Image: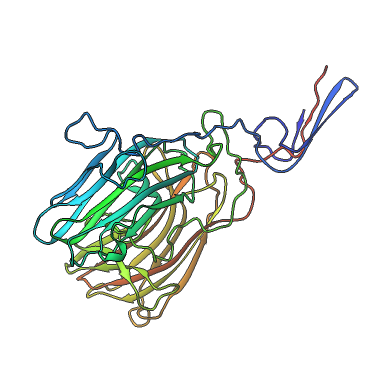
Amino acid sequence: MIRRDLEDCFPGPPCPGGSLVNHNKDNHLKIEIDGPKCCPITECPCEGGELIKNGGFEMRNADLTQEFAYWRAVNPVSNTTVTTYSNMPVYEGYKAAQFQTNTTPAELHAISLQQHITVTPGCIYRFSFAENFLGGPAGAVLQPSLIGRVYYTDCAGSQFDLINIPIVKENIPLNIDKGYSYHQKTADIPVPCDVSKVTVQFDFISSNDSGGTRWLLDGVSLRAISSASSCSKDGCVSSMGICRPGNLIKNGDFEDFTEINRGSPFLYWYQIPEDSDLAIVETFSSAGYEGLNQALFVTFPGAQPKSVSLRQIVTVTPGCRLELSFAEYFITRGESAENTPRLIGRVFWVDDSGTEFDLINVAIAKFDHESDEEKGYSFHTGTADVPVPCNVSSVYVQFDFSVTDNGGTQWALDAVQLRAVLWESICCQCFKEVALNAKL
C-alpha cells in the first residue's frame, strides 16, 4: 500500500535536507520522508562554457559573401555594411566588427549581424559585448543606435526577445571614439521548454545619414548562469513547483518601445497581422491609466470589418492557475461602427496541431452609443477555471480588437498583468509522507 498526501507526485529520493526513517516491524517496511517542499529531480545541466563562436571576430568566413565565420550580415538598408576592423583600439584580440554607412543621399541606413545558437531549454542566459562609437561626418545631426538582442522564433515566425540591450549615441564629440563600453544583461526568464535554439543579433540603424558613420563591436559572449534546466524533458522535471505571484507580463504598461518596428511599436509585444491597411496598434500618450504611454487600437477608412491583435508569449509554470488583468478605455466610436466594437483579452495555449485552448477569456463589447465613449479607464480581471496543463510551459496573452466601421474607432489598453494564483503546482508536488508496506 502506498499512502501519500497527493496522488500526482514525482517519485524519487527524499528532498534535500529531509529525513529518512526505516521501520522494520512485523515484516513490513515503512519509509517516512519529511523535508522542505521540492520536487526530487535528476538535474539537466546547463552549459558551462562560452556559446558564441568567433565572438572576437578574429576568424574570416570561407563564404566570400560574409565577413566573419559563424556570423551572417542580414537585412541591409541603403549602402550599409559590416566589415573587419583591425586598427587600434580593439577590445580583445586583434580585430573587431565595424558597422559602417557608405556614401548615399541622406536616408535611413540599417544592417543586422546574427548568429544562431543551440541552447538548453529551461536555462537562464547572460549576454554581454563591448562597443565603441567612432562617429559620423563632422557636424551631421545623427543619433544612430546599436541594439544587442537574444531572441527565439516560434513556428509562426514571430520573434520573442529574451534579452534586449538598446544603445543610442548622439553624434557629438563627447560620444565619439571614447573607447569601448561594456554591456551585460541577464534574461529575466529561462529559455522556454519547447525552444532549443536562439538568435544573437545586433541591429545597427542610422537615420538621415549620407555615409561615414562607424560603430565597433567586439567581445560578444553568451553563457548560461543557471546550473540546471527547469524544464521537464528527457527524464528531468522542474524543481520550481511553486506558483509565483509576480507579474509574468513584460512591458505591460507599454512604456518601452522597439527601436525597429517588428510588427509592433512595443517591446515584447507583436501585432497580428504585422501589416494592415485597416487596423493597427500604435502608441498613445493621453489619459494614461499608469505611466506615460498606452497601446491604442486604431482603424482607418474603409467600410468593412476590421480586426487586429496584440500578442505576447509568456513562460509559465505547468500546473498553476493564472489570473489576467488589464485596463481599457473606449475613446471613439468610428463612423458607422454602431454596436460592433469588441475587445477580447485572452490567455490560451496551442497544441502540436495548432489548436488554441482558452484558459481565460474576457470579452468586452460596446453597445451603448450614448454613454460608452470617453468615460475613462475600466479595470478588468479574469481567473482561469483550470490550471495550465502539465505539458504546457508557455501561453499566449492576446488582445483581439474588431469593429465594422468607416474608420476612426480608437480603443486604448494599459496595465496588462498575468499572475499565478498563489498555490502549489498540481504537476509538481513533493512527498510529505510516504509509507510503503511491503512483505520482506
Q: Quadrant of the N terminus?
A: top right
Q: Where is residue 372? Give x, y as percent.
A: 37, 78
Q: Which of 223 and 27 is in front in this view?
A: 223
The C terminus sits in image quarter = top right
Q: Can residue 272 be seen in this view?
A: no
Using the rendered view, name the quadrant where residue 251 is placed. bottom left
- Residue with the most extreme bottom position: 370
Q: Can residue 118 be seen in this view?
A: yes
Residue 328, compared with residue 109, is above or below; it is below
Q: Is residue 155 left or right of residue 67?
A: right
The answer to which of 294 and 189 lies nearer the viewer is 189
In the foreground, 383 or 296: 296
What residue lies at 17% left-to-right and 69% top-to-bottom?
A: 301
| Relative side of 361 to 407, left or right | right
Q: In this view, does 40 lie above or below 134?
A: above
Q: Give the residue at the far right of this rendering.
A: 26
Q: Residue furthest top?
A: 440
x 55%, y 48%: residue: 387
Q: Where is residue 52 in the image (x, y as percent from the top left)?
A: 38, 37
Residue 375's x, y, as percent?
40, 80
Q: Where is residue 107 in the image (x, y as percent from the top left)?
A: 13, 60
The extreme front residue here reads: 88
